[in-house]
Image (cartoon, grey):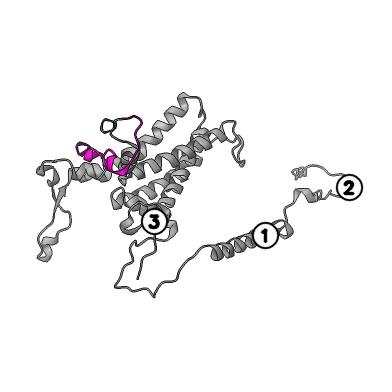
Amino acid sequence: MVADAPARGPSRSRGAVPSARPRRQREEELLVWPDLVFVEFISALVFTLTFVALAILINAPLQDRANPANTPNPSKAPWYFLNLQELLLHMHPALAGVIVPTVFLIILGAVPFFDTSNEGQGQWLSTPRAWPNLIVGFIVGTVGTWALIIYNSGKHIVVFERFTFDADSFDNFPPLIVDERLREWPESLNWLTSVRALQTDIAWPGELETIPLGETFVRTDLLGLPRGSIQWNFPAWIVEQAIPVNLMVGLPILLCLVAWRLGLAKTRRDFMILMFSGWLGSYLALTMAGTYFRGEGLELLWPWEVRPAES
């Protein structure tokens, strides 16, 4: 007996011609030319014309050759690192230059694992509350970052002295505001001039500035050198690490809680849009502050007061 041959697929009538895959319509295709190259050409043309217009309208004086023995004041990083340079002015260098960027990249890579919904996948702002979360997050991130920059730079004192006055020193109210009669910042509040003032203007006990934590792990004594010791500067830790970390973690959590209580953010995607737009506003604020508002000694100034360094 001959066993039946196993079935190799659906039976097909003898003489039938297999049907070819239907040809896609032109509206369903995106070709390199003209769909992609034409758009890239127009974008490159607009970009070039914009650069030419900026070169004509904005004065960018050439200076002397770079002198390695003379560092310009201010010395700024490339524009794409100015946000990190701005962070270096407000917290510990290791925290601003290494830990914060690394943690942010890890969180950004974890967003797809947190937002697992397939609804509206591949679409920009597809959820019903996407636009309100985008607008609120961007405004809060921008305004909040600028407020912290102004406070830590001590410029809120200038605002206080400029827009307040001592009404008791005038006969008539409202008085004319003149520079000689502006109310000065109270000396009793000098510790509120900036975050750094919490370390310098408060009489911390000397023991808190040199708390011994033991010796280093590196056996420098084997090389004939004295073995180093680790000392903890508690006031510096409060100013450079504790306060910045609590602000960077606590303020986004507070924003999420407020948005949840108000019904602005309900789903995971709403919270992701809220957080990302807030980070974007903070990123742009830090970049603008480092680019246009930092003058000599990296002091916070108005853009028209920032001048190139004179050789």
Q: Is mark 1 on a helix, strand or loop?
A: helix
Which amino acid does the dot numbered 2 rest on?
Arg
x and y, in percent, of residue 151 in the image: 32, 42
Q: Taking 232 as reference, is 103 left or right? A: right
Q: Taking 244 as reference, is 304 left or right? A: right
Which amino acid does the dot numbered 3 rest on?
Glu
x and y, in percent, of residue 242 in the image: 27, 41
**Number of numbered markers:** 3
Residue wearing tag 3: 305
x and y, in percent, of residue 23 in the image: 81, 50
Q: Which of marks 3 and 1 is nearer the N terminus?
A: 1
Residue wearing tag 2: 14
Residue farthest to the right, as pictured: 15
Q: Judge whether residue 115 can be spotted in this image.
A: no
Q: Residue drawn 44% across and 71% down?
A: 62
Is 31 rendered above or below residue 263? below
The mark found on residue 42 in the picture is 1
Q: Is mark 3 on a helix, strand or loop?
A: helix
Q: Which of marks 3 and 2 is nearer the N terminus?
A: 2
